[in-house]
C-alpha cells in the first residue's frame, strides 16, 4: 500500500473532502486507513460509576485509501506516488531498495 502511518494526506472525497490530516494507522489488507480527525464517529460511553455521566467520544472511522492523496513533504503538493527500485550502493550487493517518489517533484518521500 502506498500510504503509510505518519503520512500527511489530502482527503479527495467524502464529507471531509479538501482537508489534510495525518495518517494514524494503515490496514494494508483491507486497503483502508485511519486519519486523524477524519470520518469521526460518535460513540457513547456508558458511565463507569454510579452518578457519573455518560460521555460522547469521537473515534476515527477508517476510510478507503483511494479517497486520499499523499501530500508530498518535499513540495507540499498532493501528488501521485510512484516507486523506484535502487540497487544497494554496496559492491556485490544484490539487495534492492524500493522507494516511493513524488511524481510532481521526483523526490523520495
Ligand atoms: Zn513532491
Image: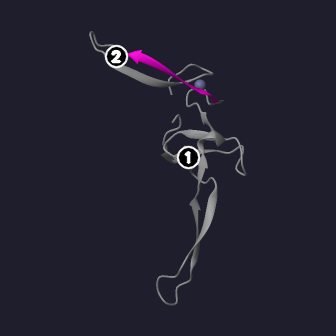
Magenta highlight range: 79-87
x 56%, y 80%: residue: 54
x 72%, y 49%: residue: 14
| Tag nearer the camera, 1 or 2 | 1
Residue 107 at x, y percent in the picture: 53, 21
* Rendered image: mark on residue 88: 2
Q: Is residue 48 visible?
A: yes
* Mark 2 Cα-neighbour bin, 10 Å: few <14, some 14–19, many ≥20: few
Residue 34 at x, y percent in the picture: 55, 50
Q: CA distance from mark 1 to mark 2?
A: 31 Å
> Residue 76 versus residue 96: which sits nearer the camera?
96
The magenta stretch spans residue 41: no
**Does dot 2 land on a helix, a strand or a loop?**
loop
The magenta stretch spans residue 80: yes
Judge whether 25 appears above or below 75 on screen: below
In this picture, residue 20 sits left or right of residue 52: right
x 53%, y 34%: residue: 2
**In the orientation shown, which residue stands out farthest toward the front?**
29
In this picture, residue 76 sits left or right of residue 98: right
Amino acid at each position: 500500500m502506498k500510504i503509510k502511518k505518519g503520512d500527511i494526506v489530502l482527503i479527495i472525497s467524502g464529507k471531509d473532502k479538501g482537508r489534510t490530516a495525518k495518517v494514524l494507522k494503515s490496514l494494508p489488507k483491507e486497503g483502508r486507513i485511519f486519519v486523524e480527525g477524519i470520518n469521526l464517529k460518535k460513540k457513547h460511553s456508558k458511565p463507569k460509576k454510579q452518578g457519573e455521566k455518560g460521555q460522547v467520544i469521537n473515534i476515527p472511522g477508517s476510510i478507503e485509501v483511494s479517497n486520499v492523496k499523499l501530500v508530498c513533504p518535499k513540495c507540499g503538493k498532493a501528488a501521485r506516488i510512484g516507486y523506484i527500485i535502487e540497487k544497494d550502493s554496496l559492491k556485490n550487493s544484490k539487495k534492492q531498495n524500493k522507494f516511493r517518489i513524488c511524481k510532481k517533484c521526483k523526490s523520495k518521500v
